[in-house]
């Protein structure tokens, strides 16, 4: 077996030169430091949402009686919910140096994780530093089919004197720093609202009832 001799010439070394490794590591550390410095200066925070009040204009649970025939077995038309309510949502931008663009925000009501109203779109809004935005959308749901579990829960809530309705917001936001505007980020807001039910509150349309709630909402961006 022959042995390669380099003589007075140096053999080619395939290993990375130490100063190249040091330069790459230094560049990565510099990038991380810049990112950390930007975060330290801007201190970005997600917006704060508060559900101020909810006005219940109509809330009705209805189900058709069972129908029978000589040929077909008894059947029951699914129960439905009809709801009309107006809510007041307040959004605050807690950032000192970051503006927020709200885009394609849909608000809807949910009960027991089931949507019971159509989505109401909020107008596109820009929120400057420390600014506050207020929306008062109407939420409508007409004869929305619900599961038997929801009907049972509603009956239990009526006996208890109140129900928990979640007002949810689903949409997109952009961040603005100086003249720079970020890409779109998904925004999801969940606001619990406890609605008191007096007497036969489920099943009839009565006078509008306004509930002062002032409930903080959970926000995911």
Image (cartoon, rainbow, N blue to C red):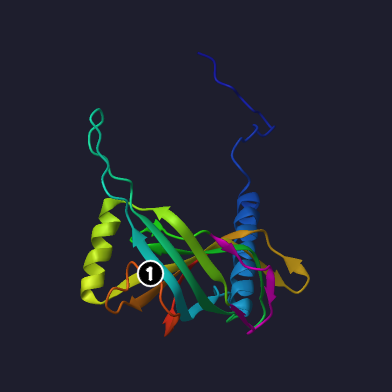
Q: Nearer the viewer, residue 154 or 180?
A: 154
Tell me: residue 35, above or below residue 96: above
- Taking the spot 32% from the left edge, 54% from the top edge, the residue there is 63
- Residue 172: image location, x then y, percent: 61, 61
Name the residue rendered at 29%, 79% in the picture.
Answer: 198
Residue 178 in the image: state x and y as whole percent. 76, 74
The part of the image, by quadrant, that contains residue 167 is bottom left
In the rendered image, residue 193 lying in the magenta stretch gets the answer no
For label 1, the residue is 165
User: Residue at the spot x=55%, y=75% of the render?
Assistant: 47
In the current view of this chain or complex, which residue is farthest to the top?
1
The single residue placed furthest to the right in the displayed view is 179
Is residue 199 found left or right of 35 in the rendered image?
A: left
- Residue 68 lies, in percent from the top left, at 24, 38
Q: Is residue 58 visible?
A: yes
Residue 109 in the image: state x and y as whole percent.
45, 65
Q: Nearer the viewer, residue 127 or 82?
A: 82
Q: Is residue 20 left or right of residue 208?
A: right
Q: Nearer the viewer, residue 64 or 177?
A: 64
Q: Who's the residue at 53% across and 77% down the image?
A: 89
Q: Is residue 219 left or right of residue 130?
A: left
Q: Which residues are magenta?
A: 119-135
Q: How many marks?
A: 1
**Does the segment drawn in magenta span residue 126?**
yes
- SS class of the residue under badge 1? strand
Q: Is residue 62 left or right of residue 16?
A: left
For the question of whether residue 187 can be seen, the reply is no
Circle 1 residues within 10 Å: few <14, some 14–19, many ≥20: some
């Amino acid at each position: 077996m022959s042995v390669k001799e380099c003589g007075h010439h140096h053999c080619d070394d395939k290993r990375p030169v130490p100063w190249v490794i040091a330069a790459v590591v230094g560049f990565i550390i510099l990038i991380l430091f810049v990112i950390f410095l930007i975060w330290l200066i801007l201190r970005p925070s997600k917006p704060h949402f508060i559900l101020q009040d909810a006005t219940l204009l109509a809330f009705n649970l209805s189900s058709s009686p069972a129908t029978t025939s000589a040929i077909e077995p008894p059947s029951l038309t699914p129960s439905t919910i009809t709801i009309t309510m107006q809510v007041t949502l307040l959004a605050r931008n807690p950032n000192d140096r970051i503006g927020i663009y709200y885009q394609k925000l849909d608000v809807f009501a949910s009960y027991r994780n089931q949507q019971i109203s159509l989505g109401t779109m909020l107008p596109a809004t820009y929120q400057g530093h420390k600014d506050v935005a207020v929306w008062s959308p109407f939420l409508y749901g007409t004869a929305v089919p619900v599961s038997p579990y929801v009907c049972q829960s509603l009956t239990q809530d009526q006996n208890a004197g109140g129900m928990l309705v979640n007002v949810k917001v689903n949409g997109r936001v952009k961040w603005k720093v100086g003249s720079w505007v970020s890409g779109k980020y998904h925004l999801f807001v969940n606001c619990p609202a406890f609605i008191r039910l007096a007497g036969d509150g489920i099943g009839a349309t009565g006078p509008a009832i306004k509930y002062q709630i002032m409930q903080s909402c959970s926000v995911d961006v």
